[in-house]
Image: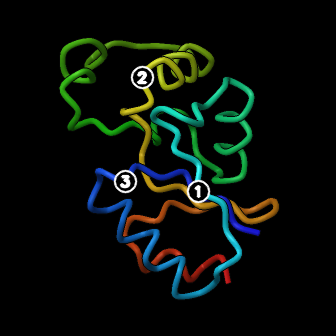
């Protein structure tokens, strides 16, 4: 079973989902922006599986990042709290299979799970 953290309004996320559908029909979609929000624990677990630090998960082109966070220094736990409160800042899509996770941008990365 694969879990995909997905934003249906994002072209890159839709491409990641399409790539996932090519490889398997055994997946669950988590709409992390609204229906299935991250918790501190779930985001921490996903980052561990990705092997990424919070700063590596930030979408720096987002307006909220530029206005509120750019150029500021935060601890790892503070960044995680910021990402949970502002899920639009989280890189997407994220695909998780067992104890491994990948960023599905570019969509070709999805193959790494299989």
User: Which is nearer the eye, 75 or 32?
Assistant: 32
Sequence-earlier tag: 2 or 3: 3
Q: Which residue is mark 1?
A: 29
What quarter of the picture does the N terminus occupy?
bottom right
Question: Which quadrant would residue 26 be assigned to in this image?
Answer: bottom right
Q: CA distance from mark 2 to mark 1?
A: 19 Å
What quarter of the picture does the C terminus occupy?
bottom right
Q: Secondary structure at mark 1?
A: strand
Q: Residue 5 location, x and y as percent?
A: 54, 51
Q: Which residue is mark 3?
A: 8
Q: Secondary structure at mark 2?
A: loop
* Image colouring: rainbow
Q: Residue 49 location, x and y as percent?
A: 71, 52
Left or right position of 34 against 44? left
Residue shown at the point (69%, 33%) measured from the top left: 44
Q: CA distance from mark 2 to mark 3?
A: 17 Å
Q: CA distance from mark 3 to mark 1?
A: 10 Å
Q: Which mark is residue 88?
A: none
């Amino acid at each position: 079973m694969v879990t995909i953290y997905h934003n249906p309004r994002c072209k890159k996320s839709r491409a990641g989902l399409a790539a996932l559908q090519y490889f398997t029909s055994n997946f669950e979609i988590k709409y992390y922006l609204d229906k299935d929000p991250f918790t501190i624990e779930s985001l921490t677990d996903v980052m561990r599986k990705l092997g990424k630090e919070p700063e590596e998960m930030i979408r720096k082109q987002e307006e909220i990042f530029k206005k509120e966070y750019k150029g500021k220094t935060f601890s790892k736990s503070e960044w995680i709290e910021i990402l949970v409160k502002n899920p639009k800042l989280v890189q997407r899509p994220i695909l998780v299979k067992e104890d491994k996770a990948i960023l599905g941008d570019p969509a070709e990365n999805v193959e790494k799970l299989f």
